Image (cartoon, rainbow, N blue to C red):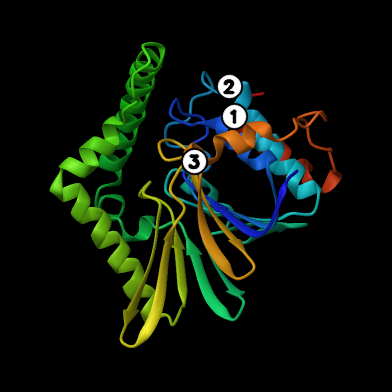
Amino acid sequence: MKRELDLVVISDVHLGTYGCHASELLAYLKSIQPKILILNGDIIDIWNFSKNYWPKTHMQVVNRLLKMMSQGVRVYYITGNHDEMLRRFTDFHLANFSLVNKLVLDLDGKKTWFFHGDVFDPSIINAKWLAKIGGKGYDLLILINRTINNILTFLGKERVSFSRIIKNKVKRAVQYITDFENTALEMAVYHSFDTVVCGHIHQPGMKSLSIKGKKITYLNSGDWVENLTALEYHNGHWSLFSYALNWGNLVSIQEDKSSEEPELVSEFLPVIKLMEDISGN
């Protein structure tokens, strides 16, 4: 049975790259029934996109999102740096789908600010070419990591995350994450927001601080490359979903016997056509 939720946030899926855990995300999306779904940037990795690599499971994720829209789920696609090409279509609205750069919602009286977070990243602002090279290197690292983990799993050993080890070991990386979170909180205070929700740094997190006498909540939805996490909001409370901790429950959910293809509702045909152009189908 699907879990009914008020709002779900996922980010940094990176469809079109080797690191994307599309199968796991598909299982998660099949397990939920949100009223609102926020795709908080880097859903499609246009920076590293190649028509030579677009697995069936990646298209199934897109189909699932379209199906959710056709079933009445309100979907907001917030652009990130890896899918910045879509920013030329900012403020595009079609039925219950919206493409935006940022979003502000009132959730039970709390002003909540959603945005990807790349505007706080100096490497994106000052040296985008270097960030793109880094993105390709990261994708290669994830591919190598996945191969080694498959071997470790076969041998009955514990899986490892190279990038997580690097982030935890390198003080500069740890400081980068801390600076990102603090900047987001400071901006929230400046704009009088109660909650700020980001992605971008692939570091899921939830924390609240009192700044200048005002309680501010910082949330990060993580990613579907390493952490496989999402933010869920229901009955006035936020929680952080982890696929690693809940995979057994997802597997137990009855498989959806219906076709993976969404109903081709005429109002969504432009979105479908866009995806076909991107994927080369």
- Residue drawn at (77%, 32%), measured in percent from left and top? 256
Q: Which residue is mark 3?
A: 245
Q: Position of residue 264 (x, y in %)?
A: 83, 38
Assign a secondary structure to mark 2.
loop
Whole-percent x, y for residue 211 in the image: 31, 81
Query: Residue 223 location, x and y as percent?
Result: 45, 44
* Residue 255 on image: x %, y %: 75, 30
Q: Is residue 39 visible?
A: no
Front residue of this view, candidates 80 and 176: 176
- Residue denoted by label 1: 58
Instruction: Name the residue carrying label 2.
Output: 55
Q: Residue 216 vs residue 1: left or right?
A: left
Mark 3 and mark 1 residues within 8 Å of each other at the beta carbon: no
**SS class, disc 3:** helix
Separation (CA) of disc 2 from disc 3: 26 Å
Could one spot residue 236 in this view of the protein?
A: yes
Q: CA distance from mark 3 to mark 1?
A: 23 Å
Q: Earlier in the sequence, mark 2 or mark 3?
A: 2
Badge 2 crowding class, 10 Å Cα cut-off, few under 14, some 14 to 19, many 20 or more, is: some
- Residue 100 or residue 4, whichever sits in front: 4
